[in-house]
Image (cartoon, rainbow, N blue to C red):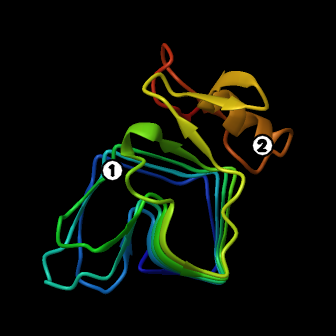
Amino acid sequence: AGLASGEIINCSVENTTIIATTLALGSITGNLDKGKIFNCYASHNTIENKTGNTNARGGIAGNSINGEIQNCYVYNNSYDSRSKNKGQFIGIASNTTLKHCYYDISKSTFPLIKEATNCTATPNYKYNTSFKTTINDSTLHISESLNQWIGKQKIYRRWTSDNGGPPYFE
């Protein structure tokens, strides 16, 4: 989506090359404007900057204003070296909430949100190469933790994984 102002739920974007033609670019949306992204993931995507513009790039959203992202994860996304505002989840954000999201510890050189103004980004969790995270002294596969957030809500798709690999929707 170029501009998301509603809700995006249970969305995945995998193995895709996304080429910049606008200022903001993310795997799921370029701009999140008063919108919500719940229970989604972006994996093995390449975000390229072909226009010479070096604005906001994020694993989930390039830019977010008054947005909310919850129960999502990013894995093995790559960004063109010309993109300066690269965030694991969001490139540039203001008045945005990022909560209960998971990111790859091996890519932790990128912040969750590259440029943040009045944002809440907690709690969020790192995971290791085995897709394990530690929450309150318990080590879980991130699919288990993502499912705990869902609880009994039927609107959200449940998560699974093959042999401890990356989570995906059942």
Q: Quadrant of residue 4?
A: bottom right
Kindly identify the amino acid type of the residue bearing the numbered disc 1.
Asn
Q: Quadrant of residue 88?
A: bottom left
Q: Which disc number belongs to residue 3? A: none
In the picture provided, is 95 more to the left or to the right than 43? right
Question: Residue at the spot x=48%, y=29% of the render?
Answer: 128
- The disc, 1 or 2, on the residue closer to the chain's N-terminal end is 1
In the picture provided, is 145 more to the left or to the right than 161? right
Question: Residue at the spot x=19%, y=64% of the render?
Answer: 80
Q: Is residue 132 above or below residue 63?
A: above
Q: Label 1 neighbourhood size at 10 Å, few (<14), some (14-19), many (20+)?
A: many
Q: Residue furthest top?
A: 163
**The C terminus lies in quadrant:** top right
Seen from the viewer's position, the closer of residues 163 and 116 is 116
| Secondary structure of the residue carrying numbered label 2 | helix
Residue 1 rendering spot, x and y as whole percentages: 44, 74
Residue 34 rendering spot, x and y as whole percentages: 66, 83
What residue sits right under mark 2 in the picture? 150
Q: Are marks 1 and 2 in contact (CB under 8 Å)?
A: no
The count of marks equals: 2
Residue 158 rendering spot, x and y as whole percentages: 67, 36
Kindly identify the amino acid type of the residue bearing the numbered disc 2.
Ile
What residue sits right under mark 1 in the picture? 77
Q: Nearer the viewer, mark 1 or mark 2?
A: 1
Residue 83 rendering spot, x and y as whole percentages: 24, 72
Question: Residue at the spot x=80%, y=45% of the render?
Answer: 154
| Secondary structure of the residue carrying numbered label 1 | loop
Q: Quadrant of residue 18?
A: bottom left
Seen from the viewer's position, the closer of residues 63 and 162 is 63
Question: Residue at the spot x=49%, y=61% of the render?
Answer: 89
Seen from the viewer's position, the closer of residues 113 and 63 is 113
Q: Label 2 neighbourhood size at 10 Å, few (<14), some (14-19), many (20+)?
A: some
